[in-house]
Amino acid sequence: MDFRDNANLDASQVEDVGGSGGSGGGRFPGGMVIGGGGILGVIVTIALLLLNGLGDGGGEQPAQRQPASDLTQECRTGKDADQSEKCRVVGVVNSIQDYWKGEVSGYRPAKTVLYSGGVRTACGAADSSVGPFYCPGDQRVYLDLSFFDDLHSRFGAQGGPFAQAYVIAHEYGHHVQNLVGGLEGGNSVATELQADCYAGVWAKKAVDTGFYDKPFTDSDIAQAIDAAAAVGDDRIQQRTRGRVDPESFTHGSSRQRVDAFKQGYTTGQPARCDTAELG
């Protein structure tokens, strides 16, 4: 997964707020959050809480946020993206949004916010335990980079740069759903599987955005498939509960998530990510 060395990065699409404080505790009093724990599959009770927009505010006061770091000085070209994790996030986000602006009429870019520990959002306060998530209230993707270590150490995925790209592409799949009305009601499993499928579509078309030297390799795609399998509800439940309860799935089984990503990657067509076929 190599970026084109002279590709111009737009670091304004990613905001690095660092350790912003905010004892989020996984609470989201202000609105529905999508994919929080979704990519993680996370602890099932937390995932259910988030996906149903529940939770009390806990009476928390807004955290004092440290000044945002300026990634525009650090992340300028594809060469930077090959050498820095944060710049790699910038490159991935740039490519994803370049693809979707050509597919969705009136596409509105969504920032990715990098944070450490806790963060305040339009959907409420969160901490890193909820995993990457998309907040429709402010149309932002939130990501604590420590999640990528958890993906390997806690969830058994092999990890790697393209596993990270899959995670980000999944969350931007939720942004696309939000723009086209796909987050309104519906089945949560189908919604998450569609985001996996959208991630696969982007992976198929990413080289056309001009940010990468060549199409992704079989090894790259294997990282995404491995990550998708690792965060299936059945694997998460088996690991945390010692048993599997399909009735409580919120994001789909390992097989469903892998199949959804493959559907998008094989076809390269967003229209083939219909929720009726996936959920």
Image (spheres, rainbow, N blue to C red):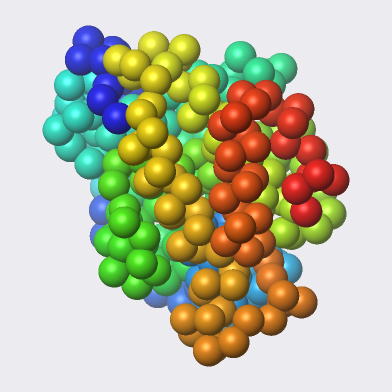
Examine the image and state in which quarter residue 128 appears. bottom left
In screen coordinates, is 146 left or right of 208?
left
Residue 19 place in picture, x, y as percent? 26, 60
Residue 160 vertical position relative to residue 205 in the rendered view, above or below: below
Which residue is painted at 68% across and 66% down in the image? Answer: 250
Q: Is residue 100 visible?
A: yes
Residue 25 place in picture, x, y as percent? 46, 77
Residue 38 place in picture, x, y as percent? 56, 60
As drawn, the residue found furthest toward the front would be 218
Relative to the observer, which residue lies in front, 195 or 116?
A: 195
**Quarter the N terminus occupies:** top left
Which residue is painted at 79% across and 38% down in the image? Answer: 274
In screen coordinates, is 28 left or right of 191?
left
Q: How many numbered discs, if any? A: 0
Examine the image and state in which quarter residue 275 appears. top right
Which residue is painted at 52% across and 74% down in the image? Answer: 236
As drawn, the residue found furthest toward the bottom would be 242
Relative to the observer, which residue lies in front, 132 or 136?
A: 132
Q: Is residue 118 visible?
A: no
Examine the image and state in which quarter residue 44 appears. bottom right
In screen coordinates, is 25 left or right of 1?
right
Relative to the observer, which residue lies in front, 101 or 155?
A: 155
In screen coordinates, is 137 left or right of 200?
right
Which residue is painted at 63% across and 81% down in the image? Answer: 244
Residue 180 place in picture, x, y as percent? 76, 33
